[in-house]
Image (cartoon, rainbow, N blue to C red):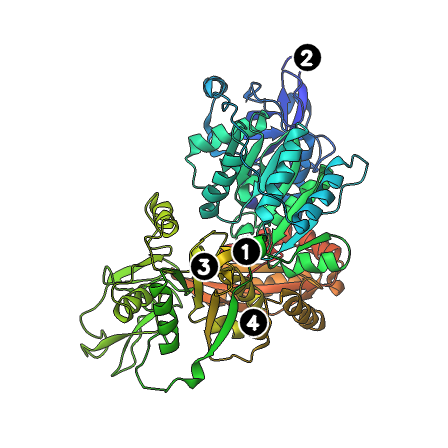
Amino acid sequence: MSQGAHRVRVAVDAPQHSGLTGPLDYASEQALAPGSLVRVPLGRRELLGVVWPAARADAAGGEAYPLAELRPVTAALDALPPLSSDWCALVEFAALYYQRSVGELAASVLPPQLRELEPKQLQLRLKKLDKLAQPAAAEPAVRPELSPAQAEALAQLDALLAQDGPQAPPPLLLYGVTGSGKTEVYLRAAEHALAAGRQVLVLVPEINLTPQLEARFAERFAGTAMVSLHSGLTPAQRLRNWLAAHFGRAQLVLGTRLAVFASMPKLGLIVVDEEHDPSYKQQDGARYSARDLAVYRARLEKLPVILGSATPSLESWQRAEEGRYRRLAMPQRIGGGALPRVRLFDMNTLPRNKGVTTALSAPLIEALRLRLERGEQSLMFLNRRGYAPVLHCLECGWKSECPHCSAFRVFHKLDRTLRCHHCGFTERVPPACPDCGNPDIAPLGRGTEKLEEQLAEALPGARVARIDADSTKLKGSLEAQLDAVHAGEVDILVGTQMVTKGHDFRRITLVAAVNPDGALFSSDFRAPERLFALLMQAAGRAGRDAEQAARSEMWVQTWHPQHALYQALTTHDFERFAKSQLEERASAGLPPFAHLALLRAEARTAEAAKAFLQAASDVAAALDGAGQVLVYAPVPMQVARVANVERLQMLVESDSRVALQRLLAAWLPALGALKREHKAVIRWAVDVDPLAI
C-alpha cells in the first residue's frame, strides 16, 4: 500500500443477514469525492458501490481497521460526475426509515447495467450518449386559455418557484376534479422551471399512463430533451436515460415510483400525478412510498412539489387540514362541463331467480342501447379479470381451489384454463368434477371475459373491447387498444381499474361500475378509500367533452345503495367522504392518526411462521420504549398460503412515529439472529407505513 493511500467509506449491497448495514471502509490510491461510483471487492465478489459522505450512516465495521489491512478499491468509474450529497441524503433517509441497509437501497435504485460495466465499457456508453442529438427546436405548441382556478394555482406555484429563502416551500396539494385541467397546470409549472434553467421530475403511478403523459409533454416541449424511467425499459434504455438525467442533459424526466431516485443535479420542480395511487408504494425489497419520498426530497432540496389528485390520499388531505400542505382547489371542469350524474341502481329490486348470474340489469342494457343509437361510447368497469372467479360443481360443492394457495383459481374461458392469479399455477379445465365425476361444472361469479361475452349477446352488433392484464400482455397491445377507443372503433369498453385512470376518452358518456360492493366490508381499513377513489376516477372518464357532459351518467349497480360511501359519490363530494373517514380513523386510532409497521414471516408451516413472530414479539417487549408501541398477535395474511408457503403477519402500532422508528431500529438486528434459530422460516420482512393490511 503506497503512502498516498486514502480511507474511503463505500455503501455496498451486502446481504441483509450479514449484519453489514452501513458503509464499509476500503483503501484507495486516489482521493475520491463523496458520491463517486466505484467497484469494490466484497467476499469473493466484486460489486458496484457509492463512496459515502463521511458524516453519513455509521460504518458497520465497529472499530476502524488500520489502513494497511483494508482491501483496495478495484476501480473508480471516474467518467461519471459524483452523485450529489442531496441524493445520498435521500437514499440514506429512505434506508433508515424503511429499515434497509444503505448499500442495498443505493444498489437497487441505480440502473442494473451500471453494476456490470467496467470503466472502459462505460466510456463507450458515454460516447454513444454524446452522439444522441439534442431535439431540434420546434414551433411552440398552442397553449389553451387558463381557467381562473388554473391561473390561481399557477400564480401560487410561481411564487413558490421564485422563493429562494432558507426554508423549503410547503408541498402543494392540487385538488382538482377529473377534467379540471391539472395536467395543464403541471405543463405550465414545468415551463416556468425549465425557463429558469432547472430540471423537472414528473411521477405517474403506472407505466400505462407514461406514454400518454409523455405525448402531452413531448407536444408542449418539442425541442426539450426528455426521458422516461420505468420498469418497462430495457436495461440499456434505462441506463441511457438515467445517464442523460445525471449529466443534466435531460431537462424533463417522466417516470414511475423508481424515478423518485433519479439523479438530477439541477432539479427545480417535482410533480406527483394521482398522488393517492397505491402503485407509488413498492411491494417488495425496500418497501418505500415514492410519494412520501418525493415530499422529503423537495424539502431536502428546498424546491416545490405538486401532489395532484381528484381524490387525495387521506394522509395528504389531513396534512392540508393541519396546514402542513397548501391546498389548491380546482372544483370545475374545463369548458364548464358538468361531472356525470351518478345513478345508484338497487340490485335488491331485481327478481331473485336462482342461477341468474348476469351482471347486466335490464335498465343498464337499455341505457347502453341508447348510447349505441347515439353513436356514443360506454365504459363497463369490473375489477376482476378472467371469465369467472371460480368453477364449482352443483352436485358435491367442489370449487376450483388452487392446490398451492389459499385462494381459488380463476376460470379463463378463451384458453379453457384454471389459473391462479397468486402463484401462476395453470391447468386445463377438467371435463368433469374431480371429486364426484359430475360433468356439469359451472362458472360462479363473473370476470371481465364473461362480461364481454354477455354484452355481445345482449347487444348484437355492438363493438365490445376488453382491457385488462390478460388482454394487454403483448408489447404494444395496450396502446393499440386505446387508439381504437380514441378513434371511435369501439362502442363498449370493458375493463379493470387499468382503464379508470388518467385516460382522456372524449366520446364516453356512460360509465357503469358492475360489482363494486366487495370493498365495503373488507377487513382492510383502507378499502373504502381505495373504492371511492376508483369510482370517482371511473366516473371521471365520462363527459370529458363539454358538449356531451350534460347527458353523461355513471351507473353503480349495488346491493347497498344507502351506504354512506355511495351517498357521497352521488354528489361527487370527496370532502364529505374524507371528513367521515377521518373521523372514523381518529376514533379507531388508525393512520394518519397513528403509525404502523407490519412484520411478515413466511414458512412451510403456519406453526413455524407463528413461532418466529411470537418470539419476535417477546424480543420487542423487552426493548427500551416498548411501552409506547403496541404489538398485536400474529394473524394469517388475507391470502394465507401462496405457492405452498404459509404467510403470517404481525401489526406494530404507535401514536408516535419517532417511537415506532426507534423500536424498529433496535428490533431489526435482533430479528436477523432470531431467524438463525428459527430455521424453518424461509423469509421475513418489515413493511413501514403498509398500504394493505
Q: Which residue is mark 4?
A: 570
Instruction: Say which quarter of the image contains residue 625.
Output: bottom right
Q: Which residue is mark 2?
A: 3
Q: Amino acid at mark 4?
A: Thr
Instruction: Say which quarter of the image contains residue 589.
Output: bottom right
Q: Which residue is mark 1?
A: 278
Tell me which numbered mark, 2 or 3, is placed earlier along the sequence: 2
Q: Which residue is mark 3?
A: 497
- Rounded to the nearest whole Å, what is the CA distance between mark 3 and mark 1? 12 Å
Q: Amino acid at mark 2?
A: Gln
The percent coordinates of residue 571 (x first, y second) are 59, 70
Marks 1 and 4 close (CB-CB < 8 Å): no
Q: Residue at x 39, y 84 (%)?
A: 350
Q: Residue at x 75, y 54 (%)?
A: 658
Tell me which numbered mark, 4 or 3, is placed earlier along the sequence: 3
Disc 2 residue crowd, few under 14, some 14–19, many 20+, Cα 10 Å: few
- Rounded to the nearest whole Å, what is the CA distance between mark 1 and mark 4? 24 Å
Marks 4 and 3 close (CB-CB < 8 Å): no
- For the N terminus, give its image quadrant: top right
